[in-house]
Amino acid sequence: MSGGLQAIRYTRGKLEVLDQLRLPHEHHYDTVSTSEEAFDCIKAMRVRGAPAIAIVAALAHGVELNNGGCEASTPQDTIAYIDSRLDYLKQSRPTAVDLSNAITHLKSVVRAVDVGTLDAAAAKSAIVDAYMAAAEDIFTKDTHTNLRIGAHGAEWLLTNAPPASKSEQGKLAVLTHCNTGSLATSGHGTALGIVRSLHSEGHLSHAFCTETRPYNQGSRLTAFELVYERIPATLITDSMAGTLFATKIRERTPIAAVVVGADRVVRNGDTANKVGTYALAVLARHHGVRFVVAAPTTSIDLHTIAGKDIKIEERRPEELTQISGAVVGEDGRVDVSRTARVATAHQEINVWNPAFDVTPADLIDAIVTEQGVVVKGESGEFDFRDVMPERW
Ligand code: MRU
């Protein structure tokens, strides 16, 4: 496990999830033992990030099965029970496709179990065992996937960053949005994994991260990860990105790339990610900054043709009109033992709170998967055939 920070702790029969709403002030793990607990944990965003959501849902149902939660006695009823729990979990958050891809995979795994000559009890336990192995596999494979994304992304950037954006030592400065690190995955991270890989190879001059309004995944989580790993980094508000790009060009130390994650990349390359990503892509194009999406193939949805068909989750108004944090004393010191929730807007104002936006493929230079980097071909379009031959 790279990075040290662990959003998800798991041993068979026990799942613990780091409560990300309490970060960076408090390091508290919740035990998640049922589908209902996982649903609440995901919906409330105590765990978030496309891969982490899928892992927690898959493992939580595994814990439930392992602990005797399924009362069915026939193989058909066992499969029906697993289906119903997974269908329920799928409703927790709609935009990230990793959860739905994981569920499709788990359903096919339990259907593929050969129960031919087994009695009912043995058949049930074979189905449960197959489910457990597949769910655990999703968890353990994820870090490996991210390490490969990190390596591919770092290499692509070093080759394709605008020459003027490289320092004399060949180092690059990048901007990232939201949180795509160890906290959003089983380890290392996707877009933040590329930042980590650049840093560990000595190729990162500086990382900038956005605050990521309204829920502050950038300031609460990414800033925390960057400080935790001692990666040279600076926090900006979302609205400062344009002036960051322009200032750095004037100072002759341009930002090389914006590196973001994905909740759903569709067949034409349009990408849903944390709201604010689209604006960064427009600004990046204007300033000649590369725009790179890091997406494991589990975040790619080849069934949806274009971004206009992606369902965008809308969340509670209070995420805009209220904020929580640790109390700052008269002396300016942060008292992590005291947290408070405060209002930051008139509570009667109308609020629109889409959690994600869609960046058109046209504004994306490269999509980095664990299988390699996808760029537009001669047709000017992304083609995922090479990285996902079996699902194409
Ligand atoms: O609402 P969140 O915090 O779940 O949104 C997370 C993002 O948008 C991430 O960029 C995405 O899920 C990729 S995480 C590797």
Image (spheres, grey):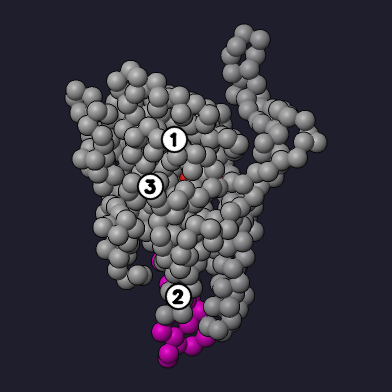
- Residue 179 lies, in percent from the top left, at 47, 40
Q: Identify the residue at image location x=65%, y=14%.
A: 329
Of helix, strand and loop, which one carries label 1? helix
Q: Earlier in the sequence, mark 2 or mark 1?
A: 2
Q: Does the image show residue 159?
A: yes
Query: In the drawing, what numbered circle is on residue 108?
Result: 2
Foreground residue among 87 and 300: 300
Q: Quadrant location of the N terminus? A: top left
> Distance of mark 2 from mark 3, alpha carbons?
33 Å
> Is 139 above or below relative to 337?
below
Q: Is residue 172 magenta?
A: no
Foreground label between 2 and 3: 3
Q: Amino acid at mark 1?
A: Leu
**Mark 1 surroundings: few (<14), some (14-19) or many (≥20) residues within 10 A:** many
Residue position for label 1: 283
Kindly identify the amino acid type of the residue bearing the numbered disc 2: Ser
What residue sits 32% from the left and 26% below the top?
254
Residue extending furthest toward the left? 169
Q: Is residue 336 left or right of residue 15?
A: right
Residue position marked by numbered label 3 in the rendering: 364
User: Where residue 50 sits: x, y (%)?
Assistant: 48, 52
Residue 371 in percent (x, y) is at 28, 57
Return the disc, 2 or 3, that comes first in the chain's sequence: 2
Mark 3 Cβ and ligand 1 under 8 Å apart: no
SS for dot 2: helix
**Residue nearest the observer in this picture, 305 or 314:** 305
The residue stretch that appears in magenta: 113-133
Query: Cα distance, mark 2 to mark 1?
Result: 42 Å
Mark seen at residue 300: none
Left or right: 180 in relation to 120: left
